[in-house]
Amino acid sequence: MKTQESMPVSKVERSAKFVKTGFQIGGNYLKHYSKKLFNPDLDREQLNEDNASDIYNSLSQLKGSALKIAQMLSMDKNILPKAYVNKFTQAQYNAPPLSGPLIMRTFTKSFGKSPQQIFDTFNIQSVQAASIGQVHEATLNGKKLAVKIQYPGVGDSISSDLRMVKPIAFRLLGMSEKELSIYINEVEERLLEETDYELELKRSIEFSKACKELKNVVFPDYYKEFSSSKIITMDWVDGLHLKEFLLTKPSQELRNKIGQALWDFYNFQQHKIRAVHADPHPGNFLITPDENLAVIDFGCIKELPSDFYYPFFGLVGKNAMNDKKATIKAFRQLEMILPEDTPKQVEFYYEAYKDMIGLFGRPYTDSQFDFSQNDFFEKLYEYGEKISKMPEFKQARGTKHFIYINRTNFGLYTILHDLQATVRTDTYTPELDLSAL
Amino acid sequence: MAKAKVKPPITVEQISESYIDYVLTNNEPPKSVYVFSKMLGINESEFYNYFASFEAIESNLWESLTSKTITLSASQEIWAQYSSREKTLSFFYSYIELLKSRRSFIVYSLKNKCNSLITPSTLSRTRIVFEEFAEQILQEGLETGELADRKLFTKRYKDALWIQFKFIVNFWIQDSSAEFEKTDEAIEKGINVTFDLFQRSPIDNLFEYGKFLSQNTKFKEKMGL
């Protein structure tokens, strides 16, 4: 693991970092096109690789929200070409730790006691970075606990980090500032929620209660009395992260079992609770020794309002888009087709989005889906690449709710693909009975 | 019975507290030691038994806050396990916490004295106490190899920490964030950067390489340099 020698101190320095990245990306394009003059066969893969590593190097030296943004971009495999993705996924694990004295300080501020006074043992060395905080191991009355501590000032720096990351995001996604603002605001809102540990604790308890019945899904217990606005204490969960789990060469049966648990967890939330754990990155899950899926982070929750849920999930499933008129109506509700579009544009976007949602919803069309199929994922990436190059899609479309719902579902698909799992997709299906409203 | 009529002698604390109360209420020092002593119901000479001037009261308060922090920090169970860097961080976190109980006075005391280049006279004794503490910690760091011994500069390390001291206190005075969270960040980042500079770095290697080359002129000549 690379160690970090220094961390940018002030906002000015952080801005400088971002500006530098902007320049480097510009430079990479320049390099790319000048090389291309002499070697027309040069493909964009190299350019993407250069860009990704510059962005990654810059982001990984920043903490908190910038790291979070790196993580978020890394989840959106459909938007970003593969080279970006490989670099960004590295960002999910590295961040410099808080000093011992600051941990003591955070504890005394929250509880008036040091961690050593509260717990029987407390390991001052963190075991894991959690993007806006870090995790420590503790024991109390023979029970092993995980104590998550937030970096100070994270909430404050999120807004300013987002302002700085904006120009780079525009560039990467090729959109204008005005169009992207609505999405950036959505991201900011979610990120700020994630810094609210009191909210997270509340949600963790609520969601783990609501999802209690799900088979093969387990949650740690949370300890309110040892939690505060900066600290969350929960049971320590023994288990393997996805990558480590896969290294143990689990049987197909076991992979299906874990995959099914994951699928059920997400679709139960989407269709029964109408609010979903919107951070399906592999760090938030553990596979326990008794073959269960443990969910350990409820920082990011996306609620699905009815005006999004009904039109969107109405489009997903077998024969859902057979009625063209109804489909266009749904696209309009979802702002994928805009009021000022010409009939020609309506036709164009209708076809394009029909393809896209058809592709996205494919796992739902049958009662079972094999996520190990490479061609399905190749098609998804291809589609993402194609769209990112089409001038018609330079303009942002679709309601803001898509960001997190797409991220959640693509994240889910990706993990299931990594698991090479086959799952039953009819366990929790969209509930579209409007009379139930 | 006669015993009960004898007033117990005034203490350092009583004088300090009355003084602080006065300046915080009136936003200026008393007109003179005479006026202040009269207010306390003591002789002027009694005041001088304890303090030479009003400034000495302030200076004394700063010093006692600082020594108290050092004692408190060092009494933590975990103290012995800390590196020099962590001890310094720990000192500042405890210091800011302790200063909180006297925030109004601190703000008053450093008002118009925020020049970062010179040390206000109210802090001169604090500086001595702090530097003594800093030197001890730095010495430990040098012995364990945590910090680089750089002949000329090593003696200046404590000055760098004193600059951080003033910076952090001033930062805290102006900090309006909830629970002074920004000050925590300023401490964490500032002290880490300072200690990063104290550690062995590529610059040291560069110096040594230069020294090596200049000492081995024989090779230089051979190579026609």
Image: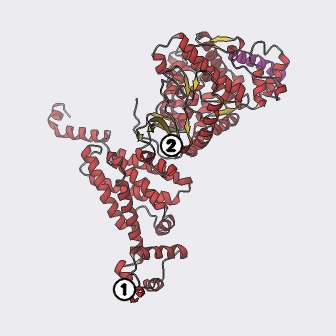
- The N terminus of chain A lies in quadrant: top left
Residue B160 visible at all? no
Q: Is residue A308 above or below residue B198?
A: above
Q: Amino acid at mark 2?
A: Tyr
Q: Which mark is residue B45?
A: 1
Pick the residue in front: B52 or A118. A118
Q: As drawn, is A186 to the left or to the right of A244?
A: right
By secondary structure, the bulk of the magenta-drawn segment is best described as helix
**Residue A345 forms part of the magenta stretch:** yes
Which chain does the numbered disc 2 sit on?
A
Instruction: Name the residue nearer the viewer: B56 or A166.
Output: B56
Same chain check for tags 1 and 2: no
How many marks overall? 2
Queried whether the magenta region covers residue A245, the answer comes back as: no
Q: Which residue is mark 2?
A: A151
Horizontally, is A298 left or right of B67 in the view?
right
Q: Residue at x 45, y 83 (%)?
A: B32
Inter-mark Cα distance, 1 to 2 = 53 Å
Q: Dividing the picture into quarters, in which one does residue A386 lie?
A: top right
Residue A229 percent location from the top left of the image: 56, 45
The magenta-colored residue range is A337-361
Residue at image x 30%, y 59%?
B132
- Residue A319 x, y percent position in the rendering: 78, 12
Splitting the image into 4 quarters, where does residue A275 fall?
top right
Residue farthest toward the left in the current orientation of the protein:
B218
Q: Is residue A315 above or below residue B15?
A: above
Q: Quadrant of residue B42?
A: bottom left
**Image height check: is A76 above or below A197?**
above
